[in-house]
Each structure stands twice: as structure tokens, then as C-alpha cells.
Amino acid sequence: MDQRLLVMHQVMLADRPRLSAYDRALASVITAGDVVADVGAGTLVLSMLALRHGAGHVYAVEADPAMAAVAERIIADNDLHDRVTLVQGDARVARLPRRADVIVSEMMGNLGPEEQMVEILDAVARHNLRPGGAVVPRRLRTELVAIEFDGEGWGTWGDVVPGYRFDAVQEFVEPHAQLHFFQREPRFLSAPVGLCDDVVGQGSTGRPRRDVRLPVHRDGCLQAIMGYFTAELADGESLSNYPSYPGCNWAVWVWPLRHTQVRAGDELHVSVVPPSGRGRARDATAWSLDCRIARAVRR
């Protein structure tokens, strides 16, 4: 088995705020005896939270055969065969024996849409959710913002040693998406603008907009475009990877740019492009970005 996959799940299980948010959301939508579909079930932690809040039966849907084998072992170790049914295969074509009252999933990528959660849950809900049933999360929003680093990451090609220049390194670096955990909050040069904003399970596609405009509202050095998600789980319960929190397993998506001075009134024209090729969309660092600066007319 790919050990990187197990490490990824270990990191997710250690993200206590993530689990606590899902715990509270499921407590608010599950009624005793409900049938729950856990999509992308992995190590079954969401299935177990659903059982904890009174679910009568959980259908745990997992596409990865290796991960499904782990899930089957966890079911056996916890003597859950009468309460959890493992469904191994593509959730988009799954037909469950009973309609679900609640669908739950955690397939948000670092940018948000990489794992196609919105598209997948829409198919699952269409085929398997009872009328009026709940989906957790119920909304997924991705936003882009222009930033200037506070002396970290790509922003370090500056005054590292007073009196000496290092910015020539930028001439050799190819643009490429990075995943970043901020040590210091970046300076926003624009307001966040939506790249995707989907109500889950109601026919949304989850596809990003191809053209996003970011009006610059303050002078500064443009160093990157940052992308991050917010998942609305249930009433009053949301989960976001920015601002980050201690133990967060999601980095934010950062596209470094050549350091460029911008002024309030300029506008950035940004296009985010998912990668082509089977399965590559799951890799956030394979997504690309084009950025053009439209300068404000100054008198």
C-alpha cells in the first residue's frame, strides 16, 4: 500500500478542529435511526461520528481499493458489520440499498475543487438522497486574493543581507503552484473574489470560473495569488483553510508571481486552469494560473 496515503490520513485524523466541526455539523442534522452515506469514507471517522449521533446505518463509499481494504479491517475490529456497509467503487454510479437521510463527505482539496467533491456529491444525492435530506458540507466556496508576503516564502527574494540583492533568482524560477502554511499573515492587496461557489447536491458542477478580476485596493508589491476554501457544513458551522489554525491539515494554494509594484486602482485579470489528464486534477500543484495587470489611468 502507498505509505503516503496512510500518512495523509494520519494527518487528517490529527486535525482536531476539522473533526470537531464535522462532529457538531452531524449532531445538528442526524435524527436517531437515519441512514447516512459517507462518501470518500477513508478510515471511517465520519461514519463513526454519524453512528455516535444516532445513525441507524451507514453506507461507507470508498473508491480506492487499498483504502477500502483498510476500512473493511476497521469495520471488523469494531464489530460494525451490522451498522456499517462498505461500498467499494465510484460513488457517482453507486446505488445504495436504501435512500440516505444524510450524505457526508470530506473531499476538499487545498484549493477546494481538486477532488471534484461537488460533482461527486451531486451524483450521489441525485441517485441516493431522500427528498429533503441533508448534505454535509452544503456549500463549498473558493476565493482568490492578491497578496504580498510578510518576509517569508516567495517574498524572501528581497533584503536578505542588507546592501546585497538576491532578486536575480526570480529569473530562473518557473511559475508553479505551491502549498504553503503561513508563519505570518500576508498583506492583502485586493479583496478576496470567488473562483467557485457551489451549493452541494443541487446540480452544481464545481468548475472554477475561467476569468476572475481582482481590483487592487492598496499600494504594494504583488508577490502571489492565494487561493483557499471555505466549506459551510451546517447552520453556524464552517471550516476553512485560511486563516489557518493549529493542527490544520490543509495548506493554502499559492501561485508566486514576479515581484511587481501595484497601486490602488490597478486590476488583476486572473485565470485558473485545472490540469488535463486522468486523475491530475487531484494534485493542487498541477493547477496553473495566468495573471495580467491592467494599470489604472493616472493623471
Image (cartoon, rainbow, N blue to C red):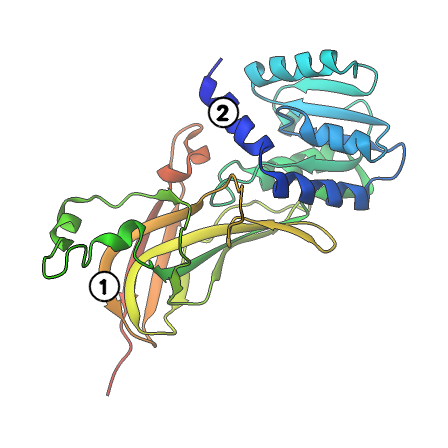
Residue 17 visible? The answer is yes
Q: Position of residue 50 (x, y in %)?
A: 77, 33
Q: Relative to 293, is 48 on the left or the right? A: right
Q: Relative to 205, is 254 on the left or the right? A: left
For label 2, the residue is 7
For label 1, the residue is 260
Q: In percent of the image, x 14 and y 48: which residue is there? A: 169
Question: Could you say whether the residue bearing mark 1 is in a helix, strand or loop?
Answer: strand
Q: Which mark is residue 129?
A: none
Residue furthest right as drawn:
32
Q: Position of residue 59 (x, y in %)?
A: 75, 24
Q: Image quadrant of residue 119? A: top right
Looking at marks 2 and 1 on the same chain, the residue that comes earlier in the sequence is marked by: 2
Relative vertical location of residue 45 with respect to residue 112 in this rendering, above or below: above
Q: Image quadrant of residue 176? A: top left
Amino acid of disc 1: Thr
Question: Could you say whether the residue bearing mark 2 is in a helix, strand or loop?
Answer: helix
Dot in front, 2 or 1? 2
Q: In percent of the image, x 65 and y 51: which residue is there? A: 238
Residue 201 visible? The answer is no
